[in-house]
Image: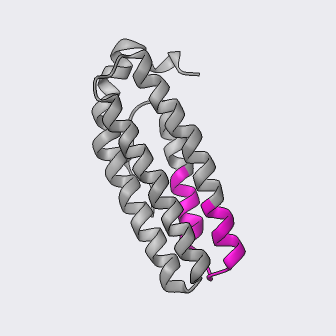
Amino acid sequence: MEWNINYEMGHPRLDAEHRTLFQVLATLSRGYCDRDLVDTQIKILEHYVAAHFALEERMMEEAAYPGIDGQRALHAEFHATVARLRAHWRQDDAPGVRREIIAELSDWLTRHIIGADHAYLPRVTTKSGPSSVG
């Protein structure tokens, strides 16, 4: 999974955080199937995503974005997906499970950034401006 221009939002902080999420998934996709490495990367992803989603939701609240409830539901879905995949990994740490985790999380993240995140960005940058997030 590699970052490309299609994921750019033009918001420095959001782009940096999205790149970090891609880096975690890239770490998961490299190398051998080490149980501790995969578990650690999933934990990092869980914690980082919680903070990132809180930032996005705060930005949407400040901009009175009308689609915030839908975004919150998508964020909750991602948390549930990560928890489910982590539980699956704990039960069976085979390379195939690691590939499943990478594929499912990569697909979700790319669809979310290109679809849902790009949808709220004009409202957020118009209402509060990219530099007001900090």
Residue 24: percent from the left, percent from the top?
A: 58, 59
Inspect the magenta stretch and tell me whether residue 37 lies in it.
Answer: yes
Q: Which residue sits at x=31%, y=37%?
A: 70
Residue 62 shown left or right of residue 45 in the figure: left
In the rendered view, tell whether residue 54 sits above or below residue 134: below
In the rendered view, tell whether residue 89 sits above or below residue 27: below
Task: Report the colour scheme.
Answer: one colour
Q: Toward which corner of the image does residue 52 lie, by quadrant?
A: top right
Q: Which residue sits at x=65%, y=55%?
A: 44
Residue 89: percent from the left, percent from the top?
A: 57, 75
Give the quarter of the figure containing the C terminus.
Answer: top right
Provide the residue span drawn in magenta.
Answer: 21-42
Q: Toward which corner of the image does residue 119 lie, by quadrant?
A: top left
Give the quarter of the figure containing the N terminus.
Answer: bottom left
Q: Which residue sits at x=63%, y=71%?
A: 38
Residue 130 shown left or right of residue 124 in the figure: right
Residue 47 shown left or right of residue 67 in the figure: right
In the rendered view, tell whether residue 88 sits above or below residue 16: below
Q: Which residue is at the far top? A: 127
Closest to the observer, 27 or 62: 62
Task: Give the overall secondary structure of the magenta segment.
Answer: helix
Residue 118: percent from the left, percent from the top?
A: 31, 36
Q: Which residue sits at x=36%, y=61%?
A: 107
Residue 34: percent from the left, percent from the top?
A: 67, 80
Inspect the magenta stretch and tell me whether residue 31 lies in it.
Answer: yes
In the rendered view, tell whether residue 112 sits above or below residue 130: below
Q: Which residue is at the far right? A: 36
